[in-house]
Amino acid sequence: MSKWVIGKYIRLSQADRDVMDREGKTESESISHQRALIQNYIDSSAELRDCGQFEFFDDGFSGASFSRPSFERMMERIKKGEINLVIVKDFSRFGRDYIELGDYLERIFPFLGVRFISVNDGYDSENYKGTTGGLDVVMKNIVYDFYSKDLSVKVKTAKRQKMKRGEYIGGHVPYGLKRVEGERYRVEPDPEATEVVREVFQCAIDGMRMTDIARRLNEEGHETPGAYYRRNHPGTKKFANVSALKCWSIDNVRVILKQEMYYGAVVGHRREALDVGGKHTVKVPKEEQVIVEGKHKGIVTKEEFLAAQRAFGKNYWKPKAQESSYPLYGKVRCGTCGRAMNHRSYQIKGKEYRYFMCLHASYQVEAGCCKRYTKEEKLNEAVWESVKKLLDLTDTVAEKVARRKADAGINQTGLAKELAELQRQLEKCNADRFANVDLFMAGNLEQDVYQSRRTELTRLVEDLEGRIRKTEGKLHEAETVRDDALGEALTQMKRFEGADGLSREMAEALIEKVVVYDPEHMEIVWKFSDEVMRVIRE
C-alpha cells in the first residue's frame, strides 16, 4: 500500500454560506470547486492517486480561527498517525491567521511527519525539507491575514453607516412589524399583530402584572410570536422545534415591553464580536447602541412606551438566580411541551425542598403540561438507579469492544492482502494493455485479435477498479472500528466506575436529557445512539 494517507481539507466561509442560502443551493460552487480541484490534483499524480483518502469539511467557519470542528477531527486523526498528508485548495482555505498557519507549516506538521500541499499556491512541503517554505509563502499568508481583518473592518463600517441612517439590518423582524415590500432595510407595522402589541402595552400601563398579561393573552387565544412567525413563514427553521402547546409567558411579554422599535425607532449595534472572525459576541451598553427614532410608523407612541417602562419597572419580577451545581442542571425537560423545566426551592419549618416544574403549565388555560411538582431528590434517585445499571455493564462492554477490535484487526489484515493482490492484478492488466498496443503497432498482431484482447482487457480493468474501490471501502470501515461509538461509550462509562451517586459531571457525560411526564413517569435519553445502547444491553 502507498505510504501516504490523504486528508482533503475544505472550508466554506460564512460569506459562501450566505450566498448558498440566498440562492437556495444545497452545495456551494466553492465546495464543488475545492473538492474537484483537490481530487484532480490527486488523480493526476501517479504517487497519490492510489492513496487512501479522507475528506474534512467545515461549513461556515472563519479562517481567522483554527477552532473548527472538522479541522479538529482531522488533527486528531493526524495525531493518531492515521493521516500523514494534508491537501488544500490554497493557504486561505486552511487558515488566514498567518502566525498560526506558519506554526503548522514550520513546526507542527514537520514534528508529526505530515506532508502539506496547497494546490493553487504550488506549495509542497516535500520540496522544502530542511528549509523554510520560502518568503513567497510567508508574504502570501500575511496578505491573507491582512485581507481577512481589513475586510472585517470594512464590513463593520458599512453596517454602522446603515445603522446611523436608520436602516434595519437585523435578521428577524420583531413580532408586530414586517419588512416593507421591496425594501430590505425598512420596516412597518404588521396589521395582523399590532393589536396584540398595543394590548400588552396598555395592560402594563394599567399596572397589570406580566404573569396576568400572559394569562389574559392565552385566554383570548392569541398566537404566540413563534407560532405567528411559523404560520407566516412556512418551511422556516426558526421556531421549528417549538412545541405546538407553547403559550404566552412572561418572557414573551417582557421582550415586547422592552422593544424600542414599537414606537418608531430603529435599534442597531446591540451586540458585537469579541474579535475578528470570532463567533462570540457581548452585549453593547445602551448608551453605545445606535438608536434612530422616527424611521417608521410606531405601534405605540414614545410616551406610551416610557409609561409602560415605568409600570414595567415597578411590577418587574426577576426570579432569583438558581445555582447550577445540582446534578441534572440543564437536563430536565417537560414530556408534554419539550421545554426545560425550572429548578425551584421552598422552605417549610426551616427545611428546604427542591423541585422541578414546567413553568409553561402555569400559563396554560386548557389541559396540557403537568402542573404537579417533581421533587429533585426522587428524580435523582430514579436517574441514579438507571445510571448504576448502565455502569454495572462496563466490564461486559469492555469485552465486546476487545472482541470487535480483534475481529477488525483480523479482517483488516485480510482486506489489506486482498487489496494488494487486486492492485498487482490491475498493474499487470494495464501492462498487458500497453503490450497489446505495441504488438499491434509493430505488425505482430492481427486487428481482430487486437480488438478482442483490447475489449477483454478493458472489461477486466473496469472490474478490478470496481473491486478495489469496494475493498478500500471495507478496509476503511475496518480501520474506523477502533474509533467507533461503542468504544467512546466505554471510555465515558469507565470514568465513573465505583461512583456511589449521581453527579453533574456524570450526567453531562452520559445523559442527553431526562424527560418528565409527571412525578411518577420519566424517560432518560442517553448521549449514546440507540444502536450503541442496543449492543450494550445485548
Image (cartoon, rainbow, N blue to C red):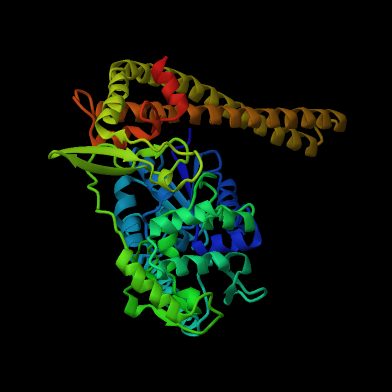
Asked which quadrant contains residue 113, the reply is: top left
State whether residue 273 appears in this view. Answer: no
Asked which quadrant contains residue 481, the reply is: top left
Judged left or right of residue 287, residue 167 is right
The answer to whether 364 is drawn above or below residue 336 in the figure is below
Residue visible at 22% across and 24% down? 497
Asked which quadrant contains residue 405, the reply is: top left
Q: Relative to the observer, which residue lies in front, 450 or 429?
A: 429
Q: Relative to the observer, which residue lies in front, 71 or 337?
A: 337
- Picture coordinates of residue 263, whole percent (x, y): 48, 78
- Picture coordinates of residue 338, whole percent (x, y): 45, 40
Q: Which residue extends farthest right?
A: 448
The answer to whether 237 is drawn above or below residue 395 in the figure is below
Residue visible at 62% across and 63% down? 22
State whether residue 271 appears in this view. Answer: yes
- Picture coordinates of residue 194, whole percent (x, y): 57, 68
The answer to whether 383 is drawn above or below residue 148 in the figure is above
- Quadrant containing the C terminus in the rendered view: top left
Judged left or right of residue 360, residue 48 is right
Q: How many marks?
A: 0
Q: Which residue extends farthest left?
A: 350
Judged left or right of residue 284, residue 365 is right
